[in-house]
Amino acid sequence: MRSRAVVSGKWLVISVALVAPVGMGGAQTKAAKTEAKGDCRRAVFDGDVKAGQGFEREFAPGLKFLLEPLLQGSGWIVRVVPVGRPQGVHDYAELATPPYRSVTPLAVSTDFSFRAQDAVGWNPRRFRYAQDAGVARRLEALYAGVVANDAAASTKAAELATEQPEGELQILNIVMVPGTANQWQMAAAVALHFQNTPHEVEQGAQPTALGKLEELQFRVKLELEPGVRAAKGVGEEKIPCVVRPTVVLNQPL
């Protein structure tokens, strides 16, 4: 996940293994399970963007989904932000989808040496987002420690992230210029569905090492908290209520 600013088209890669839940042991944590209650749903909507354009949609009370163009024209980044409040340095999706400043499902782009076809092949993209401002503040308080590879902060951030609602971005169709470079190792590990993802190759474009993403059609699905309904004009579908582990910390953040 990236910092707010992109400098010279490059992001700093921090090796922090936080994608999966981190083991919880010792005296500082105690694991419990939440009861799945209520009527569970997720918001569903489609969108499309062209290179350099953004997309936004309020999907639940007080929450907005963004697909924001990256500064160097390499693609787009998924963001979830509060409605009607100042936007902070870090957004709700970034904070709840570690590792930070590294390869991330939030970036549909040719950054991190992904070719255009590699970005397309990572489909769908699954992520999490902080369910409210309080959770976002707790995760943001841990951010600096995680980036500095502090083990305690990394563990707490990973535990808290696993409790948050899930989201998914599915590429429905994309217009692109394929890249000519050899596929990078990390791209090879995640770009598994290029042939199965509808795509169009722009004819007559000048070939480059990484290529370019020209136009994107997508579908977004975002879990809602039990009892919460999607915003007006946004579709929704019922889903099974998920029982997630709840981490009780002996010491507050």
Image (spheres, rainbow, N blue to C red):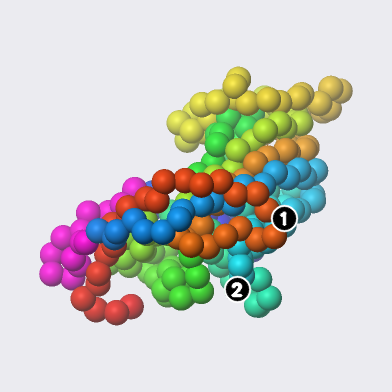
Seen at 73% across and 45% down, the residue is 47
Q: Can residue 116 be seen in this snapshot?
A: no
Residue 234 as seen in the image, left or right of residue 225: right
Badge 2 amino acid:
Gly
* Residue stretch rendered in magenta on the structure: 20-32
Residue 31 as seen in the image, left or right of residue 198: left
Seen at 60% across and 20% down, the residue is 195
Q: Earlier in the sequence, mark 1 or mark 2?
A: 2
Q: Main secondary structure of the magenta part?
A: loop
Circle 2 — which element? loop
Q: Quadrant of residue 149?
A: bottom left
Label placed on residue 233: 1
Circle 1 — which element? loop
Q: Position of residue 28 (x, y in %)?
A: 18, 70
Q: Position of residue 171 (x, y in %)?
A: 64, 36
Q: Can residue 59 be seen in this snapshot?
A: yes
Badge 1 amino acid:
Gly
Number of residues whose C-alpha sits closer than 10 Å to that of mark 2, classed few (under 14), some (14–19) or many (20 or more): few
Number of residues whose C-alpha sits closer than 10 Å to that of mark 1, classed few (under 14), some (14–19) or many (20 or more): few
Q: How many marks?
A: 2
Seen at 18% across and 65% down, the residue is 30
Between residues 139 and 184, which one lies in front from this camera angle?
139
Label placed on residue 88: 2
Label placed on residue 190: none
Please determine whether, in this image, residue 111 is positioned above or below residue 92. above
Looking at the figure, which quarter contains the C terminus? bottom left
Residue lying at the far top of the rendered structure: 195
